[in-house]
């Protein structure tokens, strides 16, 4: 995995654990809240 991919996974893990809000995580990743929810949903299905 590349550094940006690892960073994205770390942020998503923090959101999933409740240590970070979706809005803050989306801001950190430069995404919209809806896209973050889609990424979380995709991770949960794996």
Image (cartoon, helix red, strand yellow):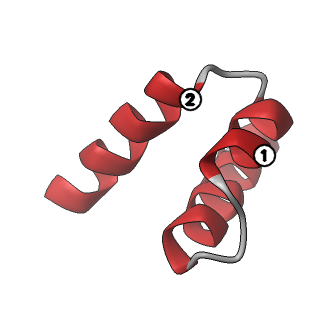
- Answer few, some or many: residues within 10 Å of disc 2's Cα (few below 14, many 20 plus, some between 14 and 19): some
| Mark 2, residue position | 33
The circle on residue 10 is: none
Q: Could one spot residue 23 in this view of the protein?
A: yes
Q: Nearer the viewer, residue 46 or 19?
A: 19
Q: Earlier in the sequence, mark 1 or mark 2?
A: 1
| Towards the viewer: 40 or 10 | 40
User: Which quadrant, please, contains the C terminus?
Assistant: bottom left
Q: Which residue is mark 1?
A: 24
Position of residue 46 in the picture relative to residue 15 (left or right): left
> Circle 2 — which element?
helix
* Quadrant of the image occupied by residue 11: bottom right
The residue sitting at the left extreme is 45
Residue 18 x/y as whole percent: 59, 75
The residue that appears at 49% across and 69% down in the rendered structure is: 16
Q: Is residue 8 above or below residue 20?
A: above
Residue 24 screen position, x and y as percent = 78, 46
Give the crowd class for mark 1: few <14, some 14-19, many >=20 residues within 10 Å: few
Taking the spot 76% from the left edge, 51% from the top edge, the residue there is 7
Residue 20 percent coordinates (x, y): 72, 65
């Amino acid at each position: 995995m590349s550094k940006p991919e690892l960073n994205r996974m770390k942020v998503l893990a923090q959101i999933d654990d409740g240590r970070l809000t979706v809005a803050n995580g989306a801001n950190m990743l430069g995404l919209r809240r809806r896209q973050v929810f889609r990424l979380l949903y995709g991770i949960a299905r794996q």
